[in-house]
Amino acid sequence: MTGPTTAFREATADPRPAAVPLAHVSIELGHLYFEDFRGDETRLPRYFARVAPWVEAARSVLAAEFGERRPRISTCFLMDDYFGPTLAPRDVLPQVIAAADAAGLHIDYLARESGCAEADGVALAELVQERIVADPPPDTNGSRPPAKDSGWLSNGQRSPQPGSAMNSLRPWGPPAENGTARHSVFVDVELRGRGKWSCAYLAAIWQLLRLGLLRHNGEAVAQPREWPEPFPRDWAQLPAVIRLNPKAAPFSAYRTLSVLGPRFLPTEHAVRTILSQVAVDRQVNEAIVARAAAEDLPLPLDVVERLGYLFV
C-alpha cells in the first residue's frame, strides 16, 4: 500500500494576474448625489461650468510635465446609486452627459457607486476588506476588534474612555496618530454601518479601480463596457463602469486626479487612511510600477502617493 504523496510546484507556475490597459492619469470630473440636482435644472450646468477651468488647468500642467510626449488622460464621473434616494438612469444620465458636454468636459467613463460594492458577481467591498491590515497603535495589546468585526478603522489610538481603574478615575488623554512627526491628525473611519458600506470605504475602492489594482482570482474586475442609449429604468441593469467614449484612453491609470467640491475633503482624508492599510496585490502593484518605469515615468510603490486632488 502506498502512502500519501506531496505535490510540489514552482511559485512561477501560478498564473500571473491579468494586466489592464493604463492611461497616464484618470481625472474624476465629479461625484454627485441625486439631491445635488433634484428639482433644480441649473445645478448641473453650474457645477460643470465651475469645474471646467480647473480641469483645463490640470490638463495644461500635465501637458507641460510630459513635454513632447502626449499624456494619455481619461475622464470619469461617479454617480451615487447606492445610498439613495435615486432617480432612474434614463432620467438622470442624459442630463449629466449633456451638461458636461456643454461645459467642454466630455465624460469618457461613467460609474455607479454600487459597482464599488459589487460588480459582475464579485463582492468588491468584501474582497478589499480581506486585504485590510490594520496599523495598531504602539504599546497596545490588540484588544480593539479588527476592522472586519468592528466596521471601523483608525490611524492611531483613540482617547481613553472615562472609567475607573484601581478605584480611581482614569485620567483623560488625547487621541494620537500613529507615526506622526509633530502633531497628530487622528482619524477614525467608519467602513460600514446600518447594513451599508460607508461612502469613504466605497470611495477607496473607487480609487483602487481607477488605479487598476483590483483582481479576483487573478482576473481584472469591473472592466468598462459599452452601453447603447437609451439608458434603462434600473441602475442594476447597467455595468459598474460604462464607456461613453469608444476612443477614450484607458479607464484605469498610473495616477488619479479627483476634482471635487470642498465637502469631499474629509471623505478623501478617510480614503487615504483606508488605503494606507490595504495590502494590494504585490504582483499587480509591482507590475504596474515596472510598466511606468518602462515609459520613463517614476511611480511610487505606495498607492496613496498616486492620488491627487483639486477641491474647488
Image: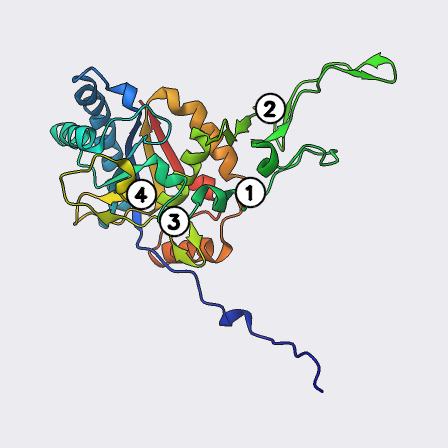
Q: Which mark is residue 121?
A: 3
The x, y position of residue 306, in whole percent, is: 41, 41
Between circles 3 and 2, the one closer to the viewer is 3
Residue at coordinates 50% horizontally, 26% vertically from top-left? 194
Is tag 3's residue or tag 4's residue first in the polypeptide sequence? 3
The x, y position of residue 185, in whole percent, is: 56, 24
Q: Label 2 neighbourhood size at 10 Å, few (<14), some (14-19), many (20+)?
A: some
Contact between marks 4 and 1 (CB within 8 A): the answer is no
State the CA–CA distance, disc 1 to disc 2.
22 Å
Q: Circle 4 is placed at which residue position? A: 240
Q: Label 4 neighbourhood size at 10 Å, few (<14), some (14-19), many (20+)?
A: many
Is tag 3's residue or tag 1's residue first in the polypeptide sequence? 3
Element on which disc 4 rests: loop
Locate the C terminus by quadrant.
Answer: top left
Q: Circle 1 is placed at which residue position? A: 132
Q: Circle 2 is placed at which residue position? A: 184
Q: Label 1 neighbourhood size at 10 Å, few (<14), some (14-19), many (20+)?
A: some
State the CA–CA distance, disc 3 to disc 2.
40 Å
The x, y position of residue 83, in whole percent, is: 37, 27
> Which amino acid is tagged 2?
Ser
